[in-house]
Structure formats: structure tokens, C-alpha cells
Image (tube, rainbow, N blue to C red):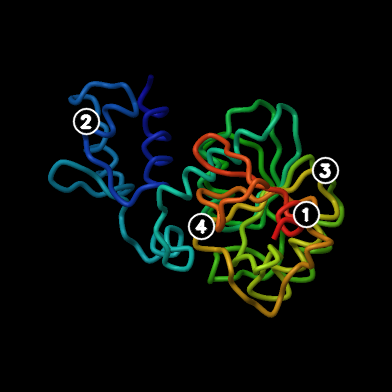
Amino acid sequence: MGFNERKEKILNLLDLNDTLTIHELVEQLGSSTATIRRDVALLEQQGILARFWGGIKKVETPEYIRESGLKYQKMSDHHELIGKIAASQLQDNELIFIGSGMSTLAMIPFIERKNIHVITNGIPQLEALHRQNIQALLLCGFFKEYSRSVVGKETVEMLRGYRFDHAFLGTNGLNDQYCPLSADAYEDAIKTLCIKQSKEVFLLAGHDKFSRTAYYYIPAEMAKDVNIITDRPDKNRAAWEPIDGGYIGRIGSLSESD
């Protein structure tokens, strides 16, 4: 593995972790300790990362704080678990939509299928896809600092021109009827359109997203065929199917069994 390939892998790992130890890098990249130390020294000189005793972290510029913040949240183990399960649903030669959010960002390093084409409204998602050498298009619209995404009428109109094999969406939460919630009308419109224009839709929701309320929501009837991927369901019910350490459930089945 050459320097450029190791560099890309280190940057991908820093997308998912605030800090990394030299030992973790050695294990993840399969390179010697001496090689990793030379790499991180060079990357520090390039201003890409910062070293501390025994490890590295990404340079905390204002831009990095915005990129890694996503509402000032920290990437957690459950984001990575959900992201890995989501990526496993893909097939070769698909056109997919990846929405904004932590869990959708976490799925990108796990995409291994060939000839995947992605439409997204998330800027961190676009950057992560570029590092994975996955062809991606960023929709146009107004910049939303809160989630580092683009939204608006132009975004929705551009989205109307696509039909997706799969759509992977984040969410502000799910109410007691498992209706997907949104922070505003723009996000709600994007979710609604993706549900209508995708063969299969996955909603990525951690265990902390259940039993919430919001003004904007998609009715359970409209979202009945949407699949929720989570690390831990809100209740232990037969409608949830275990999958690779997490769970998947169809909203229609979940709401009926409630």
C-alpha cells in the first residue's frame, strides 16, 4: 500500500473518530509502526492533522468544527453499526440517494459495491464519497449550517428528476407511530420525495431517536414500506429483525404491531 492510499484511509478513519492512536492506525492499515509515524509526520507538515503523544487528531480549524460537528454531535459506535448495515444493503450498479446526518455519513466508508452512483444533499457526505472514489452529485439549494446540507425549492425540483434504487435517509426522530420526523418543511419535502421515487428506502435511526415529537412528519401510511435500521429497537417485538448486530424493521409492520 502506497503513501497516497494510506493517506486516504487515515482521513477516512478521522471522519469517524475524533482521535486515533498509532497502534490503531497500525492495525487498521496493516503497516509498520515506523511507516505510520513517517506518514503522520508528513501529514502534520501538510496541515492535514495534528499529532499528540501516541496518536493523531484532525486539525481543529473552524471549517473542521463545522464538518465534524453536524449539530456538534460526536460520531459514536451506534452510528458506525447502523452505517455498516446500511451499506450492506447495496448492490452493484445502483443509483442511490444519501441524505444528510451522522449515520448516513458513517455508512460511506463501508460501501464496497462497484459502480455506485450517488446523489446527495450533504456536504460532508460528498467529501467522504470523493475520498472513497465514488461518483457523486451534490444537489443545489440553500446552505443549511445546522446539518451542513443544501435544502430548498431548488433542491426538491432537482431531486424530482431522479429515480433511485435505494435511498438512505437520516431523521430527527420517530414518533410513537414510527412516523419519520423532520426539523423543517425543506427536510420533510426531501424525505417525502425520496420515499415516492425510490424502489427501497432505509431510515437510519439510533436508539435515541424513538418516541419523539415534531411539527413536520410523514404519515405512517405514506412511509409504510420504509425500513428502519437501528442499533437497538425501542421495544422487543417480533416485527424487528436482527441483522449484523443491529435491527431492521418495516414501518408498516411496526405500526401495526404497536
| Quarter of image, res 118 | top right
Q: Which mark is residue 252?
A: 1
Quote the CA–CA distance across marks 3 and 2.
Answer: 47 Å
Q: Nearer the viewer, residue 148 or 223?
A: 223
Q: Which residue is painted at 37% across and 29% down in the image?
A: 6
Q: Nearer the viewer, mark 3 or mark 2?
A: 3
* Depth order, front residue of 40/171: 171
Q: At numbered mark 3, what does the secondary structure look like: helix, strand or loop?
A: strand
User: Pointer 1 and pointer 2: residues touching (CB < 8 Å)?
Assistant: no
Q: What residue is pinned by disc 2?
A: 38
* Residue density around tag 2, few if under 14, some if 14–19, many if 20 or more, within 10 Å: few
Which is nearer the N-term, disc 2 or disc 4? 2
Q: Earlier in the sequence, mark 1 or mark 4?
A: 4
Mark 4 = which residue? Answer: 207
Q: Position of residue 14 (x, y in %)?
A: 37, 45
Looking at the image, do the residues carrying marks 1 and 4 touch, with CB atoms under 8 Å apart? no
Q: Are marks 3 and 1 in contact (CB under 8 Å)?
A: no
State the quadrant of the C terminus: bottom right
- Disc 1 to disc 2, how far (Cα)? 53 Å
